[in-house]
Amino acid sequence: MNIAQDSVVAFHYRLSEEGGSEIETSRDGSPSLYLHGHKNILPALEAAFEGRTSGDTFSVTLSPAEAYGTRRESNLQRIPIKHLMSSGTGKVKPKPGMVVSVQTNQGVRQVTVVKVGKFNVDADTNHPLAGKTLTFDIEIMEVRGASAEEKAHGHAHGVGGHQH
């Protein structure tokens, strides 16, 4: 089955920066899943999946504009510490360089702590990968048609149901 609108794609990836240093990989766990055609991954990456099938391997390099945008040095914001979240534990003891999550009116966003005060942090609100040329090395593990529930929800569900 070729990847097209409403295909559920299971894939492994290796993400690296220009120059080859690895940022992350899915090889340590289960493959990532996404519902094709529903804007669940970067548009340029989704376009590279189009028409491919299970067993295909490929690499795609994305410019900052195609990935997470260019860095804006003016994207600094003072945020009350009580609004910071970490994955899993909730409360955070922030340190410079730490990536934390903040609830915004556009949903949860990741920010990088630049400076820590008593009650607030100064945070860089650029995406942590903004300004980077990124290469994704992809191996497609499985392609299947989406269920009616997945189409209605607009995302893939993992083994045994939802993967929210």
Image (tube, grey):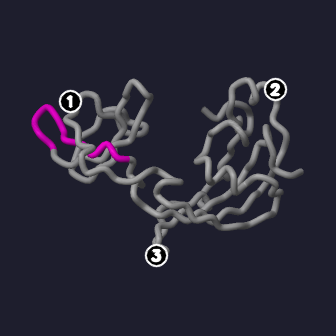
Does the magenta portion include 151? no
The spot of residue 15 in percent (x, y) is 54, 62
Tell me the amino acid under the disc marked 2: Ala
> Which amino acid does the dot numbered 3 rest on?
Gly
For residue 35, side relative to residue 77 (left or right): right
Residue at (13, 31) in percent of width and height: 119
Distance Cα–Cα, label 3 vs label 1: 36 Å
Amino acid type shown at disc 1 = Pro
Density class for disc 2 (Cα within 10 Å; few <14, some 14-19, many ≥20) is few
Q: Secondary structure at mark 2?
A: helix
Secondary structure of the residue carrying numbered label 1: strand
The mark lying in front, picked from 2 and 3, is 3
Tag 3 residue: 19
Of pointers 3 and 1, the one earlier in the residue sequence: 3
In the rendered image, residue 67, in percent from the top left (x then y), is placed at: 51, 53
**Number of other residues with Cα within 10 Å of mark 3, as a class: few under 14, some 14 to 19, many 20 or more:** few
Measured along the vertical axis of the image, is residue 78 above or below residue 137? above
Which mark, by number, is residue 80? 1
User: Quick check: 9 left or right of 90?
Assistant: right
Residue at the left extreme of this rendering: 118
Q: Which residues are magenta?
A: 116-126
Q: CA distance from mark 2 to mark 3?
A: 42 Å
Q: Tell me the residue at 68%/43% (across/down).
A: 34
* Residue 133 or residue 84, whichever sits in front: 133
Q: Quick one: label 1, few (<14), some, or many (20+) residues within 10 Å?
A: some
Q: Please give the residue where the numbered disc 2 appears in the rendered image.
A: 148
